[in-house]
Amino acid sequence: MLQRTVLFALLIMFITNCSRDDLGPAAVAEDYHSELEEWKMDRLESLTSPTGWMRLAGMYFLEEGENRFGSGDDVDIQFPDGSIPEFAGTITLQNDIVVISVAEGVDITHDNNLVDTMVIYDGEDAPALEYGSLEWIIIEREGLFAVRLYNKENQKVDEFEGFPRYETSSDWVLKAKYHPAPEGTTIPIINVLGQQVETPSPGTLEFMINDNIYTLDALEGSERLFIIVADLTNRTETYQAGRYMYIDYPEDGSNYTVIDFNKAYNPPCAYNLYTTCQLPPMQNRLNVAITAGELRPVGWDGLTL
């Protein structure tokens, strides 16, 4: 398991007064502003969808063995008051397999079919269950198992129109040089539960702000590079624990891509308590103010870190 030399990253990060012709602002298309508006609408729809991050209503960790669930006071997993019968059944965790047994007379469904007893997590599949406006699945986080609960009825989410943002500026669309990492490279990433995971890192992005060179270590993000970044605005204006971005891999035959800080967005833990967000690694905490992208949420119950 390989790791990049931290010294190398720090040396690059703190080089100053070193202008580079291959870095700096990137050219933007004529329809850039309309494309950004479309990106913002896609994000809004994702956040407010029936199982979007904003409709999370609870995360309940399972104990090994039988866990009684419902909305009553005498259950192990207490769903919101009145949302489900006081005792709705049991959820049993044994040998990393989770099974639900529904109480008689409680109409919990999966794919519109009534559920009696059913495996709801087996290491690969985690089917969604529904009762009224509630929907839930089982998630696993480094050996911890939890019920992730959504409530589709939420007027505040229905009225949500997006987070406050800095004014869009093409000055924050920057050329970046991609330095691929050796195969098998990982970096330690900590989440809000305090768990540290060695996470695959495909490479590093090098870019320039005000003639100063900075770097960001990327994580694998399906078909794109995933970036977790912190900067000086986190102290006062943006979410304290940093923001997220996705960046395109360079095109074939090129080592260059584009970082668009106008698309820096709040992680789910900025506005919902029931998430397990990853935090920026130390080398991605930049000593510069990135005055672009989403600002700190106002009026939402996120984690204060």
Image (tube, grey):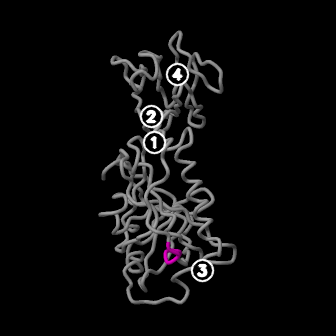
Q: Which residues are magenta?
A: 169-173
Residue topped by disc 4: 100
Give me the C-alpha separation between circle 1 and circle 2.
8 Å
Badge 4 crowding class, 10 Å Cα cut-off, few under 14, some 14 to 19, many 20 or more, is many
Marks 1 and 2 close (CB-CB < 8 Å): yes
The label shown at residue 146 is: 2
Dot 1 crowding, Cα within 10 Å, few <14, some 14–19, many 20+: few
Q: Helix, strand or loop at disc 4?
A: strand
Considering only order in the chain, which callout, 3 or 4, is on the residue closer to the N terminus? 3
Distance CA(mark 1)–CA(mark 4): 19 Å
Residue type at mark 4: give it.
Ile
Horizontal and vertical percent for residue 282?
36, 65
Mark 2 and mark 4 in contact? Answer it, CB < 8 Å.
no
Which residue occupies 59% across, 74% down?
Answer: 257
Q: Mark on residue 141? A: 1
Task: Give the side of residue 28 with respect to residue 274, left or right.
Answer: right
Q: Earlier in the sequence, mark 2 or mark 4?
A: 4
In terms of sequence position, does the residue under pointer 2 or pointer 3 come before the other? 3
Tell me the residue that label 3 is attached to.
27
Kindly report the secondary structure that dominates the magenta region of the rendered protein. helix
> Which amino acid, by three-letter code, is at mark 1?
Arg
Q: Nearer the viewer, residue 45 or 7?
A: 45
Asked if marks 2 and 3 touch (Cβ < 8 Å), the reply is no
Eye-nearest disc, 1 or 2: 2
Q: Are marks 3 and 1 in contact (CB under 8 Å)?
A: no
